Amino acid sequence: QVQLVESGGDSVQAGGSLRLSCASSGFTSSRYSIGWFRQAPGKEREGVAAMSRDSTTTSTNYADSVKGRFTISSDNAKSTVYLEMNGLKPEDTAMYYCAAEGRWLYADSQLLAHVYTYWGQGTQVTVSS
């Protein structure tokens, strides 16, 4: 059974940085996609960063709102995907979730929540001004 566990959320001031982690277990596909999503109270869940990987290629994608500030990366040895967040803004405040799908997702679907099968429980990020 696939499990995803997020960690690293915290309360920071505007301009600060955080690194979120998504540890996976039970995920055996060599071709997969991982996405980071966020949801603020009263708002829809939105994709912020995603990657698709196979044995030779990695493709990443970012929402316009986080380009240049957020970076998605992975450590396969630790079965962990990271979201490095710099230059945080109050509007980045949300519950952040990682999601996984056992297939390659192309750019037009990497940031769509409904295409992902597996989800973590979320980690809260709060940015104060």
Image (spheres, rainbow, N blue to C red):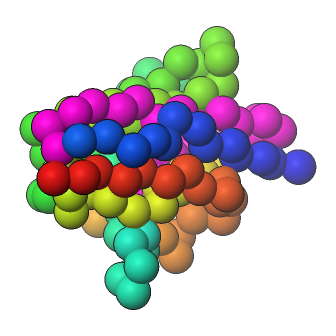
Residue beneath the point at 52% across and 76% down: 114
Q: Residue at x 78, y 47 (%)?
A: 3
Query: Quick check: can you spot residue 51?
Result: no
At horizontal 32% and vertical 59% (from top left) the residue drawn is: 93
- Count of numbered circles in the view: 0
Image quadrant where residue 48 sits: bottom left
* Closer-to-camera residue (107/86): 86
> Based on the displayed image, in which of its 4 quarters is residue 79 positioned?
top right
Q: Main secondary structure of the magenta part?
A: strand
Tell me if residue 25 can be seen.
yes
Please name the residue shown 69% across and 43% down the image: 5
- Whether 25 is drawn above or below 94: the answer is above
Residue 85, quarter of the rendered image: top left
**Front-lying residue, 87 or 110:** 87
For the magenta stretch, what is the residue range?
14-38
Q: Is residue 86 magenta?
A: no
